[in-house]
Image (tube, grey):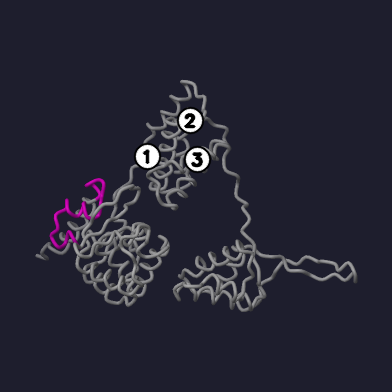
Amino acid sequence: MNPKQSFPVKQNKTTNPETGISKPTEAILTISQVLGYFEHTLKKPNNYLRIVRRYLEFCVEQQYFIDPISMALYTSGQRPSLVSPVRRFIKFAAGHHINKVKADTNDKKKPPANSPYILAFLHDSKTLRGEQSKESYLKALNTFFHYIDDNELSFNGNVVNEFIMELKKDDKSAFTINLYLSAIKQFTKWLLSNRVRLGLDLNLHQIEALRDVENVRGLKIERKFYKDSLSENQRKQLLDNIQDPRDRAIIALLSITGLRTVEITRLQIMDVNLENGLLYVLGKGKATKAVVKLFELTKKSLSQYIESVKPIDKAQKGIYLFGKLKTSQVQYIARKYLIKNNLKKKGVSPHSLRHTAGQVLLANGAQPMYVQRQLRHQQFETTQFYIQKQIEKDFLEGMPDK
């Protein structure tokens, strides 16, 4: 489709009761339909669609038209990087006579009959703190119960095994299959522990059948070097070429301090202790914060960022260091600068910056147990994975030609 041409809109006819004359009226498109057309005008990759979607959801919620007035109300006080996509969309919408959208229709299959239990489980879970984790578990559990309903099966260990085999036939990765299995196991354990509160009248046979789920084994995952890391010089190049104080602080936290992208979004201003070079991090699936070392380069970047924004009461709780930043936005920022510096290649992703932190620490002689502590690996086996990568690198560089 040529993006410069007006896209076709299904027309209905309305009749004027006084004149009897019929004229076509344009059907209102959904948010996703409009974004689908808008996407054709964009160069990839960018985050315009995500930003514009939030603006359109705002318009639907407030029953506003798509025009400069609603744009001004939505973007008031926002950073220019968030205003520009909306302004471009307003121009696009005006050119195609779009002044209103409606919410997306939900054409998906209805959740299984026991979905209220799934929602209660997700609400009660202490380990699933992020919305993305909850969505992944919801998808896994709904897929499993659709499988049960469609095949008229019971909920027991044998059926879970059969479900795993079906996922393998569908070429699901071992990581995905084990994620699904983890969701089913945790849900089953919760169901058994809360059956009285939930009013489930289970007999002994049904209880034993559910307990068998715990014995289902996941797939063995071959530990490959599935994420590359940057060298220390490449990391320096990356940081030196970032002018925006906020973005430089984020990249420093990822690549030097070794934070996960989701941990960036959880940082509060009170978590930063520049004087002592400490940072208090709320890790993945954790309820308490762990203290890590900031390192001088990260301290410098954070200081410059904090000085660039308006003063904040550091004692006040609930003030996020980077505002309402989402994980997807952190990933976009990291990916953008990797591409800009020609460092984005196969095996290199935003998560590679965390790997970079660990690899550089090991390359500079840091004790593996300290690296484990800094990166907050629950098991030392994960840190050994980093060590093995360093051994391979040293082996190839250290072996003599003769």
Name the mark nearer the viewer: 3 or 2: 2
- Residue situated in front as seen by the camera: 338 or 87: 87
| Residue highlighted by disc 2 | 197
The percent position of residue 391, horizontal first and vertical second, equals: 17, 56
Q: Secondary structure at mark 1?
A: loop
Q: Is residue 376 magenta?
A: yes
Residue type, label 2:
Arg
Judge from the rendering whether residue 313 lies leftward or rightward of residue 373; answer left or right.
right
Check if mark 3's residue and mark 2's residue have beta carbons within 8 Å: no
Indicate which disc, 1 or 2, sits on the residue closer to the N terminus.
2
The percent position of residue 222, horizontal first and vertical second, equals: 31, 47
Q: In the image, is residue 177 above or below residue 81?
A: above
| Residue highlighted by disc 3 | 118
Indicate which disc, 1 or 3, sits on the residue closer to the N terminus.
3
Q: Residue at x 49, y 47 (%)?
A: 139
Give the Cα separation between the discs numbered 1 and 3: 21 Å
The percent position of residue 123, horizontal first and vertical second, equals: 46, 43
The percent position of residue 206, horizontal first and vertical second, equals: 48, 24
Q: Secondary structure at mark 2?
A: helix
Q: Secondary structure at mark 3?
A: helix
Q: Is residue 289 magenta?
A: no
Give the Cα separation between the discs numbered 3 and 2: 14 Å
Residue type, label 3:
Ile
Dominant secondary structure, magenta = helix
Indicate which disc, 3 or 2, sits on the residue closer to the N terminus.
3
Residue type, label 1:
Gly
Residue extent of the magenta highlight? 360-382
Q: Quarter of the image holding residue 280?
A: bottom left
| Residue highlighted by disc 1 | 218
